[in-house]
Amino acid sequence: LGAVGALLATAFNICVHKPCTALLRRWRSTEQVGTQGGAYAAPTQPTHEKIHMDFRTQVTAYTAFAYLFVAGLIREYAILFRALVLQDEVAKKFLAREKWTTGWVQWYLVHIYSMYVDIFNRPIASAPDSCFEVVKRRRKGCSFFAPMHELENTAHVKRCLNLASYN
């Protein structure tokens, strides 16, 4: 049901929100041209339109997004199947968890962000100096069903070079 709600939200965004935003943008640009005695000049091109990606980069990015989306949908229904048909306790517990958000945000946090949270969010085991140590973490189970399990700290640490500036 969560995936169906997400698809309906996307359809609403494409069919209703985007056309209304375009009309509002056009209305604002005609309204603001004459303000302050002609001192305000509407920008001829929005900032985000100045950046252009080549076709290969666009295809690569959209392919990666599509892969993450399809893998998340398959994972969602596989967990649902495990809970309802196979009566798996871990899957039941995962489906009954407390949810802090709804819709796309919840789906993104569970199926995309939680898969890669350990890359950018590792706990530090030493003082943040030119080199520091981070705690290695792992999840139980296979990588496909990783969102069903919490990250657990291990006794192992890894020494890293600090490339960030704390000044």
Image (cartoon, rainbow, N blue to C red):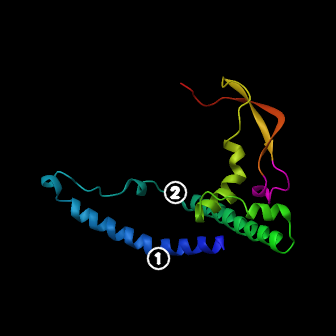
**In the rendering, which numbered label is found on residue 144?**
none
Q: Secondary structure at mark 1?
A: helix
Which one is in front, 94 or 56?
94
Q: Is residue 25 above or below residue 119?
A: below
**Residue 61 percent coordinates (x, y):** 61, 59
- The residue that label 2 is drawn on is 53
What count of labels does the image hold?
2
**Residue 133 percent coordinates (x, y):** 74, 29
Q: Amino acid at mark 1?
A: Cys
Which one is in front, 25 or 4?
4
**Residue 5 percent coordinates (x, y):** 60, 73
Please provide the residue range marked out in magenta.
139-149
- What residue is drawn where x is 73% and y is 67%? 76
- What residue is drawn where x is 30% and y is 58%? 44
Disc nearer the start of the sequence (1/2): 1
Which one is in front, 93 or 56?
93
Q: Secondary structure at mark 2?
A: loop
- The residue that label 1 is drawn on is 15
- What residue is drawn where x is 77% and y is 35%? 135
